[in-house]
Amino acid sequence: METLDWKNLPFGYLKTDYNVRCVHKDGKWGKLEVSASEYIDIHIAATGLHYGQEAFEGMKAYMGKDGKIRLFRWEENAKRFCSSADGVKMAVVPVEMFREAIFKVINLNRKFIPPYGSGATLYIRPLLFGSGAEVGVKPASEYTFLVFVTPVGPYFKEGIKPVNMLICRDFDRAAPLGTGIYKVGGNYAASMRAITAARNGGYSNTIFLDAKEKKYIDECGPANFFGIKDNTYITPKSESILNSITNMSLIDIARSFGMKAERRPIAVEELAEFTETGACGTAAVITPIAKIVDPDMNMIYEYCRDGKPGPLSMMLYERLMAIQCGDAEDEFGWITIVE
Protein backbone atom coordinates (compact mmCIF):
# COMPACT_ATOMS: atom_id res chain seq x y z
CA MET A 1 0.00 0.00 0.00
CA GLU A 2 1.01 3.60 -0.47
CA THR A 3 2.64 4.94 2.70
CA LEU A 4 0.14 7.09 4.56
CA ASP A 5 1.03 10.44 6.04
CA TRP A 6 -0.07 9.39 9.52
CA LYS A 7 0.37 12.81 11.11
CA ASN A 8 -1.83 14.52 8.53
CA LEU A 9 -4.68 12.06 8.21
CA PRO A 10 -8.14 13.66 8.02
CA PHE A 11 -10.94 12.58 10.31
CA GLY A 12 -12.74 10.91 7.45
CA TYR A 13 -13.03 7.73 5.40
CA LEU A 14 -10.06 6.02 3.74
CA LYS A 15 -10.35 2.65 2.03
CA THR A 16 -8.81 -0.31 3.82
CA ASP A 17 -8.34 -3.87 2.61
CA TYR A 18 -11.17 -5.81 4.22
CA ASN A 19 -14.48 -5.68 6.02
CA VAL A 20 -16.55 -8.47 7.55
CA ARG A 21 -20.23 -9.26 7.01
CA CYS A 22 -22.96 -11.58 8.19
CA VAL A 23 -26.65 -12.09 7.34
CA HIS A 24 -29.52 -13.03 9.64
CA LYS A 25 -32.03 -15.07 7.64
CA ASP A 26 -34.71 -17.66 8.46
CA GLY A 27 -34.42 -16.76 12.12
CA LYS A 28 -30.68 -17.38 12.51
CA TRP A 29 -27.31 -15.78 11.89
CA GLY A 30 -25.02 -17.17 9.23
CA LYS A 31 -21.22 -17.18 9.35
CA LEU A 32 -19.00 -14.13 9.21
CA GLU A 33 -17.63 -13.52 5.73
CA VAL A 34 -14.64 -11.43 4.70
CA SER A 35 -15.05 -9.00 1.81
CA ALA A 36 -12.66 -6.68 -0.03
CA SER A 37 -15.52 -4.67 -1.51
CA GLU A 38 -16.60 -1.27 -0.20
CA TYR A 39 -20.10 -1.85 -1.51
CA ILE A 40 -23.16 -3.90 -0.59
CA ASP A 41 -26.01 -5.25 -2.69
CA ILE A 42 -29.28 -4.14 -1.15
CA HIS A 43 -32.89 -4.79 -2.09
CA ILE A 44 -34.80 -1.72 -3.24
CA ALA A 45 -37.48 -2.43 -0.61
CA ALA A 46 -35.08 -3.04 2.31
CA THR A 47 -36.47 -1.72 5.60
CA GLY A 48 -33.14 -0.07 6.35
CA LEU A 49 -33.79 2.27 3.41
CA HIS A 50 -37.49 2.91 3.93
CA TYR A 51 -38.27 2.60 7.62
CA GLY A 52 -35.01 3.44 9.36
CA GLN A 53 -34.20 -0.03 10.67
CA GLU A 54 -30.51 0.72 11.19
CA ALA A 55 -28.04 1.00 14.06
CA PHE A 56 -24.30 1.55 14.31
CA GLU A 57 -21.40 2.00 16.70
CA GLY A 58 -18.21 4.06 16.74
CA MET A 59 -15.06 2.60 18.27
CA LYS A 60 -11.30 3.08 18.08
CA ALA A 61 -8.24 0.84 18.24
CA TYR A 62 -4.99 2.38 19.52
CA MET A 63 -1.36 1.40 18.92
CA GLY A 64 0.63 1.56 22.15
CA LYS A 65 4.27 2.44 22.67
CA ASP A 66 4.80 -1.28 23.38
CA GLY A 67 3.51 -2.24 19.92
CA LYS A 68 0.29 -3.72 21.28
CA ILE A 69 -3.11 -2.86 19.85
CA ARG A 70 -5.61 -1.68 22.43
CA LEU A 71 -9.38 -1.74 22.13
CA PHE A 72 -11.36 0.47 24.50
CA ARG A 73 -14.44 -0.90 26.32
CA TRP A 74 -15.70 -2.98 23.40
CA GLU A 75 -18.14 -4.80 25.69
CA GLU A 76 -20.00 -1.53 26.30
CA ASN A 77 -20.27 -0.94 22.56
CA ALA A 78 -21.60 -4.48 22.14
CA LYS A 79 -24.25 -3.93 24.82
CA ARG A 80 -25.33 -0.63 23.31
CA PHE A 81 -25.44 -2.20 19.83
CA CYS A 82 -27.78 -4.89 21.19
CA SER A 83 -29.97 -2.25 22.84
CA SER A 84 -30.17 -0.19 19.64
CA ALA A 85 -31.09 -3.25 17.58
CA ASP A 86 -33.86 -4.19 19.96
CA GLY A 87 -34.99 -0.56 20.10
CA VAL A 88 -35.91 -0.54 16.41
CA LYS A 89 -36.92 -4.25 16.40
CA MET A 90 -34.01 -5.75 14.50
CA ALA A 91 -32.31 -9.10 15.02
CA VAL A 92 -29.78 -8.70 17.83
CA VAL A 93 -26.14 -9.48 17.06
CA PRO A 94 -24.79 -11.88 19.74
CA VAL A 95 -22.01 -10.34 21.82
CA GLU A 96 -19.58 -13.11 20.88
CA MET A 97 -20.23 -12.55 17.17
CA PHE A 98 -19.73 -8.82 17.67
CA ARG A 99 -16.39 -9.53 19.37
CA GLU A 100 -15.29 -11.95 16.67
CA ALA A 101 -16.14 -9.48 13.91
CA ILE A 102 -14.33 -6.58 15.59
CA PHE A 103 -11.16 -8.54 16.30
CA LYS A 104 -11.15 -10.14 12.84
CA VAL A 105 -11.47 -6.84 10.97
CA ILE A 106 -8.74 -5.23 13.08
CA ASN A 107 -6.34 -8.08 12.44
CA LEU A 108 -7.14 -8.15 8.71
CA ASN A 109 -6.30 -4.45 8.46
CA ARG A 110 -3.33 -4.23 10.85
CA LYS A 111 -1.22 -2.29 8.37
CA PHE A 112 -3.75 0.56 8.57
CA ILE A 113 -3.39 1.00 12.33
CA PRO A 114 -1.63 4.34 12.82
CA PRO A 115 1.64 4.21 14.76
CA TYR A 116 1.99 5.31 18.35
CA GLY A 117 2.58 9.03 18.72
CA SER A 118 0.94 10.01 15.42
CA GLY A 119 -2.25 11.20 17.09
CA ALA A 120 -4.20 8.99 14.67
CA THR A 121 -6.24 5.88 15.43
CA LEU A 122 -8.10 3.09 13.66
CA TYR A 123 -11.80 3.94 13.65
CA ILE A 124 -14.15 0.95 13.74
CA ARG A 125 -17.73 1.13 12.47
CA PRO A 126 -20.09 -1.79 13.21
CA LEU A 127 -23.34 -1.46 11.26
CA LEU A 128 -26.65 -3.36 11.32
CA PHE A 129 -29.60 -2.73 9.02
CA GLY A 130 -32.79 -4.30 7.76
CA SER A 131 -31.91 -5.82 4.40
CA GLY A 132 -35.14 -7.77 3.93
CA ALA A 133 -37.80 -6.40 1.60
CA GLU A 134 -41.01 -5.01 3.10
CA VAL A 135 -43.47 -2.51 1.68
CA GLY A 136 -45.68 -2.45 4.75
CA VAL A 137 -44.31 -0.90 7.95
CA LYS A 138 -43.03 -3.86 9.92
CA PRO A 139 -39.68 -5.38 10.92
CA ALA A 140 -37.69 -7.05 8.17
CA SER A 141 -37.25 -10.80 7.90
CA GLU A 142 -33.56 -10.40 7.03
CA TYR A 143 -30.74 -8.30 8.53
CA THR A 144 -27.16 -7.58 7.53
CA PHE A 145 -24.37 -6.97 10.03
CA LEU A 146 -21.03 -5.62 8.86
CA VAL A 147 -17.93 -3.99 10.30
CA PHE A 148 -15.47 -1.78 8.44
CA VAL A 149 -12.47 0.22 9.63
CA THR A 150 -10.61 3.32 8.50
CA PRO A 151 -7.59 5.16 9.88
CA VAL A 152 -8.50 8.63 11.13
CA GLY A 153 -6.50 11.60 12.26
CA PRO A 154 -7.20 13.50 15.48
CA TYR A 155 -10.47 15.43 15.53
CA PHE A 156 -8.56 18.63 16.40
CA LYS A 157 -5.51 18.95 14.16
CA GLU A 158 -3.98 21.85 16.06
CA GLY A 159 -4.68 20.43 19.49
CA ILE A 160 -7.83 20.85 21.54
CA LYS A 161 -9.44 24.18 20.77
CA PRO A 162 -12.54 25.54 22.56
CA VAL A 163 -15.52 26.10 20.25
CA ASN A 164 -18.70 28.18 20.26
CA MET A 165 -22.14 26.58 20.35
CA LEU A 166 -25.70 27.73 19.74
CA ILE A 167 -28.86 26.85 21.66
CA CYS A 168 -31.57 26.33 19.05
CA ARG A 169 -35.20 25.92 20.12
CA ASP A 170 -36.51 25.59 16.57
CA PHE A 171 -35.58 21.92 16.20
CA ASP A 172 -35.68 18.71 18.25
CA ARG A 173 -33.27 15.82 17.92
CA ALA A 174 -35.50 13.22 19.59
CA ALA A 175 -38.73 12.98 21.55
CA PRO A 176 -39.12 11.65 25.11
CA LEU A 177 -39.72 7.89 24.94
CA GLY A 178 -38.60 7.93 21.30
CA THR A 179 -35.37 6.58 19.81
CA GLY A 180 -33.01 9.18 21.30
CA ILE A 181 -31.41 6.65 23.67
CA TYR A 182 -30.44 4.40 20.76
CA LYS A 183 -27.54 4.85 18.35
CA VAL A 184 -29.63 4.82 15.20
CA GLY A 185 -29.25 6.88 12.06
CA GLY A 186 -32.62 8.58 12.38
CA ASN A 187 -31.44 10.59 15.38
CA TYR A 188 -28.53 11.97 13.38
CA ALA A 189 -30.77 12.77 10.42
CA ALA A 190 -33.12 14.62 12.78
CA SER A 191 -30.20 16.69 14.10
CA MET A 192 -28.92 17.89 10.74
CA ARG A 193 -31.22 20.90 10.31
CA ALA A 194 -30.16 22.35 13.64
CA ILE A 195 -26.48 21.54 13.14
CA THR A 196 -26.50 23.08 9.65
CA ALA A 197 -28.22 26.21 10.95
CA ALA A 198 -25.66 26.55 13.74
CA ARG A 199 -22.69 26.11 11.41
CA ASN A 200 -24.14 28.54 8.90
CA GLY A 201 -24.25 31.03 11.75
CA GLY A 202 -20.58 30.53 12.53
CA TYR A 203 -20.98 28.10 15.43
CA SER A 204 -19.29 24.73 15.76
CA ASN A 205 -22.50 22.95 16.73
CA THR A 206 -25.86 23.21 18.41
CA ILE A 207 -27.09 22.37 21.89
CA PHE A 208 -30.46 20.62 21.94
CA LEU A 209 -32.93 21.22 24.74
CA ASP A 210 -35.48 18.70 25.94
CA ALA A 211 -38.30 18.37 23.41
CA LYS A 212 -41.09 18.47 25.99
CA GLU A 213 -40.48 21.71 27.92
CA LYS A 214 -37.38 23.32 26.36
CA LYS A 215 -36.01 23.82 29.87
CA TYR A 216 -33.17 21.32 30.14
CA ILE A 217 -29.97 20.49 28.25
CA ASP A 218 -30.16 17.29 26.22
CA GLU A 219 -27.52 16.48 23.61
CA CYS A 220 -24.65 18.67 22.43
CA GLY A 221 -24.77 18.22 18.67
CA PRO A 222 -23.98 14.53 18.13
CA ALA A 223 -22.31 14.24 21.56
CA ASN A 224 -23.09 14.31 25.28
CA PHE A 225 -22.88 17.55 27.26
CA PHE A 226 -21.06 18.08 30.54
CA GLY A 227 -20.45 21.02 32.84
CA ILE A 228 -18.04 21.46 35.74
CA LYS A 229 -18.53 23.56 38.87
CA ASP A 230 -17.47 23.26 42.51
CA ASN A 231 -15.15 20.35 41.62
CA THR A 232 -18.17 18.43 40.31
CA TYR A 233 -18.62 16.86 36.87
CA ILE A 234 -22.30 17.18 35.88
CA THR A 235 -23.95 15.62 32.84
CA PRO A 236 -27.63 15.47 31.79
CA LYS A 237 -30.03 12.72 32.74
CA SER A 238 -32.72 12.40 30.11
CA GLU A 239 -34.98 9.88 28.42
CA SER A 240 -33.89 11.05 24.97
CA ILE A 241 -30.07 11.16 24.94
CA LEU A 242 -27.55 8.53 23.96
CA ASN A 243 -25.60 6.90 26.78
CA SER A 244 -22.08 7.87 25.73
CA ILE A 245 -19.35 5.39 26.64
CA THR A 246 -16.86 8.26 26.69
CA ASN A 247 -19.09 10.13 29.15
CA MET A 248 -19.43 7.04 31.36
CA SER A 249 -15.65 6.78 31.43
CA LEU A 250 -15.11 10.46 32.22
CA ILE A 251 -17.47 10.12 35.21
CA ASP A 252 -15.32 7.29 36.59
CA ILE A 253 -12.10 9.20 35.96
CA ALA A 254 -13.49 12.32 37.61
CA ARG A 255 -14.33 10.34 40.73
CA SER A 256 -10.87 8.76 40.73
CA PHE A 257 -9.43 12.29 40.88
CA GLY A 258 -11.55 13.07 43.93
CA MET A 259 -14.17 15.04 42.01
CA LYS A 260 -17.86 14.50 42.51
CA ALA A 261 -19.96 13.36 39.56
CA GLU A 262 -23.67 13.81 38.97
CA ARG A 263 -26.01 12.66 36.23
CA ARG A 264 -29.18 14.77 36.52
CA PRO A 265 -31.35 17.27 34.66
CA ILE A 266 -29.46 20.49 33.87
CA ALA A 267 -31.63 23.58 33.50
CA VAL A 268 -30.53 26.07 30.85
CA GLU A 269 -30.08 28.74 33.52
CA GLU A 270 -27.46 26.60 35.26
CA LEU A 271 -25.10 27.27 32.35
CA ALA A 272 -24.27 30.55 34.11
CA GLU A 273 -22.89 28.62 37.10
CA PHE A 274 -20.40 26.37 35.31
CA THR A 275 -16.71 27.22 35.17
CA GLU A 276 -16.13 24.71 32.33
CA THR A 277 -18.42 23.07 29.78
CA GLY A 278 -17.83 20.63 26.96
CA ALA A 279 -19.08 17.91 24.66
CA CYS A 280 -17.77 14.36 24.81
CA GLY A 281 -17.83 11.39 22.46
CA THR A 282 -15.69 8.86 20.60
CA ALA A 283 -14.55 11.19 17.81
CA ALA A 284 -13.04 14.09 19.77
CA VAL A 285 -13.13 12.57 23.29
CA ILE A 286 -13.67 16.08 24.75
CA THR A 287 -14.59 19.26 22.89
CA PRO A 288 -14.28 22.23 25.28
CA ILE A 289 -16.90 24.94 24.84
CA ALA A 290 -15.76 28.57 24.85
CA LYS A 291 -19.15 30.21 24.45
CA ILE A 292 -22.80 29.17 24.43
CA VAL A 293 -25.18 31.62 22.78
CA ASP A 294 -28.91 31.54 23.55
CA PRO A 295 -30.45 34.07 21.13
CA ASP A 296 -34.05 33.47 22.26
CA MET A 297 -33.19 34.45 25.83
CA ASN A 298 -30.61 37.05 24.75
CA MET A 299 -27.96 35.27 26.85
CA ILE A 300 -24.30 34.47 26.26
CA TYR A 301 -22.49 32.06 28.56
CA GLU A 302 -18.71 32.35 28.35
CA TYR A 303 -15.97 29.94 29.41
CA CYS A 304 -12.29 29.53 28.46
CA ARG A 305 -11.82 33.29 28.44
CA ASP A 306 -8.08 32.86 27.88
CA GLY A 307 -8.79 30.78 24.77
CA LYS A 308 -7.54 27.59 26.42
CA PRO A 309 -9.48 24.50 27.58
CA GLY A 310 -10.37 24.46 31.27
CA PRO A 311 -7.86 22.71 33.57
CA LEU A 312 -10.24 20.03 34.82
CA SER A 313 -11.46 19.21 31.30
CA MET A 314 -7.85 18.82 30.18
CA MET A 315 -7.01 16.67 33.19
CA LEU A 316 -9.89 14.32 32.37
CA TYR A 317 -9.03 14.29 28.65
CA GLU A 318 -5.35 13.53 29.20
CA ARG A 319 -6.03 10.68 31.63
CA LEU A 320 -8.56 9.04 29.34
CA MET A 321 -6.26 9.35 26.33
CA ALA A 322 -3.34 7.97 28.34
CA ILE A 323 -5.39 4.91 29.31
CA GLN A 324 -6.57 4.35 25.75
CA CYS A 325 -3.03 4.55 24.35
CA GLY A 326 -1.44 2.48 27.12
CA ASP A 327 0.52 5.37 28.64
CA ALA A 328 -1.29 5.13 31.99
CA GLU A 329 -2.33 2.21 34.14
CA ASP A 330 -5.75 0.84 33.24
CA GLU A 331 -7.09 0.82 36.79
CA PHE A 332 -10.65 0.36 35.54
CA GLY A 333 -10.11 -2.74 33.38
CA TRP A 334 -11.30 -0.99 30.21
CA ILE A 335 -8.61 -2.10 27.77
CA THR A 336 -8.49 -5.33 25.78
CA ILE A 337 -5.32 -6.24 23.92
CA VAL A 338 -6.01 -7.42 20.38
CA GLU A 339 -4.00 -10.58 19.78
Image (cartoon, helix red, strand yellow):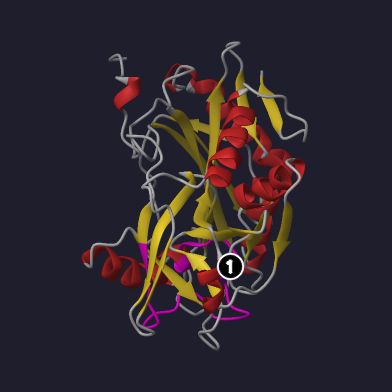
Q: Where does residue 297 sit, x and y in percent of width and height?
A: 39, 84
The crowding category of the residue bearing disc 1, from other C-alpha atoms within 10 Å (few below 14, some 14 to 19, many at least 20), is: many
179 vs 24: above or below:
below
Q: Is residue 171 magenta?
A: yes
Q: Position of residue 218 (x, y in %)?
A: 54, 71
Look at mark 1 in the image and give the residue it sits on: 241
Residue at x-position 51% and y-position 71%: 272
The quadrant in which the C terminus is found is top right
Q: Quadrant of residue 27?
A: bottom right
Q: Is residue 267 magenta?
A: no
Q: Is residue 331 left or right of residue 89?
A: right
Residue 39 % position (x, y): 35, 42
Q: Is residue 80 above or below residue 173?
A: above
Q: Looking at the figure, which quarter contains the N terminus?
A: top left
> What x and y, as percent, mark residue 236?
62, 67
Name the residue located 64 percent from the left edge and 29 percent from the top edge. Answer: 323
The residue segment tinted magenta is 165-187
Q: Can residue 111 be seen?
A: yes
In the picture shown, does residue 14 fall above or below 305? above
Q: Nearer the viewer, residue 329 or 140?
A: 329
* Residue 91 makes an appearance in the image: no
